[in-house]
Image (cartoon, helix red, strand yellow):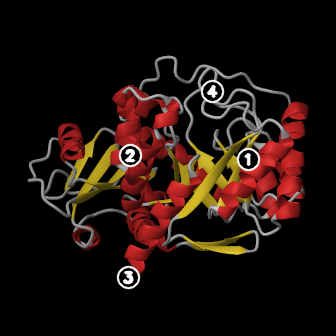
């Protein structure tokens, strides 16, 4: 059973759920819902006052509607069994506490009440934005130092392009690209928080041995399941991202019925697996641009708040992505200002790590956001 808090104050979201559940409620500010999906096993034998003022049923899904204060109060008048009550209560708690999570990554504490900037370092010949620029070790290290001195909180290093249509590379080649760079960065800046952008357990393991403290897996742990054990044994933080298909084919006509629910269910499921084996430091990423149409990306950004009830900090990477170019007819090199505007919007909707090529802009945005919430 998957549970999700949904902001129904949004007009499009409200219409989507009204059509699904056929309810007769007026939209207003502060209107929320908790949806329980795939509840048929837990639901059997339970008598619930369906289609009342605030409880609705559609196939194997259930929706409770009200303010965030009213929903738990309404549990007392329902006939839900203890298991369903516990799920609803826990989901509300995770939603409420998501932005107050704090844990150490490496030697540094990350309090996710605040926003952080993650600088992208692609040590590849074929990444969509900067492919080939930093394949040379010295140039890659220089770029990393420049991002660190500009205020980057994390440097995310990848040795395999994941742009649409890209081919996989061997472990040997990926190690050759990333390991020397990690070593040299940490020689010069030993306090740097390094994230290894890989789907391969061996690459993650070797990177962590060299000083990386985050595993950023675009497959959410589905391409190489041993990567979970690497993160667990090393006490590394792990970013779980949603990807539909494989990078080579992910943009070949991707389709969703409800992209937000489908991405949410995937991330919630993978986070449960990771948490279940003992990974303590989990971050989720909806995977903008990875097997998504323009309208899918926009829906995920607009409803980013709804991912808070997974219960982990949210990372988002929109930097120079093709959907920006498709909407505004902009070349890659002219997309930074729009990226930064989207980053600001994402922070207001719950994102706490901004993955970006333009660290200077992202750091400024994070500083302004952090100043506002602490004022």
Residue 166: image quadrant is top right
Q: Position of residue 245 (x, y in %)?
A: 59, 26
Q: Earlier in the sequence, mark 3 or mark 2?
A: 2
| Residue at disc 2, secondary structure | helix
Crowdedness near tag 3: few (<14), some (14–19) or many (≥20) residues, C-alpha within 10 Å: few
Residue 53 to residue 369: above or below: above
What residue is pinned by disc 4? 247
What residue is pinned by disc 1? 157
| Residue at disc 1, secondary structure | strand
> How much space separates mark 1 and mark 4, taking CA atoms?
17 Å
Q: Earlier in the sequence, mark 1 or mark 2?
A: 1
Q: Earlier in the sequence, mark 2 or mark 4?
A: 4
> How much space separates mark 2 and mark 4, taking CA atoms?
21 Å
> How much space separates mark 3 and mark 2, taking CA atoms?
26 Å
Residue 123: image quadrant is top right
Crowdedness near tag 1: few (<14), some (14–19) or many (≥20) residues, C-alpha within 10 Å: many
The residue furthest bottom is 375
Residue at the spot 79% in from the left edge and 39% down from the top edge: 200
Q: Identify which residue, 133 or 87, lies in the foreground.
A: 133
> How much space separates mark 1 and mark 3, taking CA atoms?
34 Å
What residue is pinned by disc 3? 375
Q: Earlier in the sequence, mark 1 or mark 3?
A: 1
């Amino acid at each position: 059973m998957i549970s999700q808090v949904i902001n129904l104050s949004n007009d499009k979201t409200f219409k989507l759920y009204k059509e699904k559940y056929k309810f007769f409620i007026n939209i207003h500010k502060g209107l929320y819902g908790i949806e329980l999906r795939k509840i048929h096993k837990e639901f059997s034998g339970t008598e619930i006052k369906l289609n009342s003022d605030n409880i609705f049923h559609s196939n194997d899904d259930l929706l409770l509607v009200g303010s965030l204060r009213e929903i738990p109060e309404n549990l007392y008048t329902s006939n839900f069994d203890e298991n369903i009550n516990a799920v609803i209560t826990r989901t509300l708690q995770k939603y409420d506490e998501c932005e107050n999570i704090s844990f150490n990554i490496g030697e540094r504490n990350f309090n996710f009440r605040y926003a952080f900037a993650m600088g992208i370092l692609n040590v590849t010949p074929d990444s969509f934005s900067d492919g080939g620029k930093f394949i040379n070790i010295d140039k890659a290290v220089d770029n990393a130092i420049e991002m660190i001195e500009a205020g980057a909180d994390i440097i995310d290093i990848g040795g395999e392009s994941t742009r649409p249509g890209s081919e996989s590379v061997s472990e040997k080649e990926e190690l050759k690209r990333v390991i020397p760079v990690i070593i040299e960065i940490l020689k010069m800046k030993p306090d740097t928080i390094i994230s290894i952008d890989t789907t391969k357990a061996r690459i993650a393991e070797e990177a962590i041995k060299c000083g990386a403290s985050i595993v950023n897996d675009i497959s959410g742990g589905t391409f190489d399941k041993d990567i979970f054990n690497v993160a667990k044994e090393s006490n590394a933080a792990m970013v779980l991202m949603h990807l539909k298909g494989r990078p080579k084919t992910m943009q070949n006509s991707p389709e969703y019925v409800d992209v937000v629910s489908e991405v949410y269910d995937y991330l919630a499921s993978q986070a449960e697996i990771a948490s279940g084996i003992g990974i303590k430091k989990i971050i989720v990423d909806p995977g903008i641009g990875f097997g998504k149409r323009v309208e899918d990306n926009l829906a995920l950004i607009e409803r980013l708040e709804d991912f808070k009830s997974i219960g982990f900090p949210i990372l988002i990477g929109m930097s120079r992505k093709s959907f920006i170019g498709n909407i505004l007819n902009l070349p890659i090199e002219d997309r930074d200002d729009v990226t930064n505007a989207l980053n600001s919007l994402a922070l207001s909707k719950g994102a706490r790590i901004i993955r970006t090529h333009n660290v200077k802009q992202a750091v400024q945005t994070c500083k302004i956001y952090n100043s506002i919430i602490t004022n």
